Amino acid sequence: MSTTAMTRLGYALTGIFAAFLAIASIAPKLVGADVASDSMRQLGWPDGYVLTIGLIELACLALYLVPRTALLGAILMTGLLGGAIATQMRVENPLFTHTLFSVYLGLLMWGGLWLRDPSLRALIPMRGLAGRINGA
């Protein structure tokens, strides 16, 4: 795949990740939607934390979307997603649909960053199975 195609695909994945997070998670928390409070309550979070968690998510997403701070944003967002996984595990929600959903989001986020950032591709090269077999 050409570098231009990889970069475009990376920005597309980043856009999907950012839009999903902003619409499905951050916005409901920031506007005080009942669905956000109810969901957080079911997970064992007191009502007073909904806005704070939404602001943390927004800050991490903003850092991720700015090219100069994208790596820091991805690292911080990974920590946030790890906390979501731990919360889902604690309340014993289903594995593939709830607990691992943050893993799916993390893969989308990191995949988008890896494709759009040549320095990250150089730091973490992806080699095919044939390259590993041949010792490359």
Image: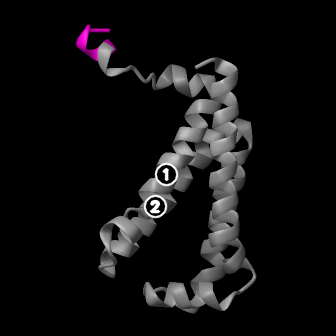
- Determine whether, in the image, residue 60 is placed left or right of residue 94: right
- In the image, residue 71 lies at what x, y percent? 60, 39
Q: Is residue 118 above or below residue 48?
A: above
Q: Which mark is residue 36?
A: none
**In the image, what residue occupies the spot 43% across and 66% down?**
83
Q: Which mark is residue 106?
A: 1
Report the Cα–Cα distance between label 2 and label 1. 6 Å
| Residues rendered magenta in the picture | 131-136
**In the image, what residue occupies the spot 74% across and 43% down?**
66
- In the image, residue 123 lies at what x, y percent? 49, 23
Q: From the viewer's side, name the closer residue of 118 and 52.
A: 118
Q: From the viewer's side, name the closer residue of 71 and 126.
A: 126
Dot 2 corresponds to which residue? 102
- In the image, residue 34 lies at what x, y percent? 65, 91
**In the image, what residue occupies the spot 68% across and 42% down?**
12
Q: Is residue 1 above or below residue 30?
A: above
Where does the N terminus fall, quadrant-wise?
top right
Q: Amino acid at mark 2?
A: Ser
Under circle 2, the secondary element is: helix
Q: Is residue 75 above or below residue 98?
A: above
Q: From the viewer's side, name the closer residue of 123 and 39.
A: 39
**Circles 2 and 1: CB atoms closer than 8 Å:** yes
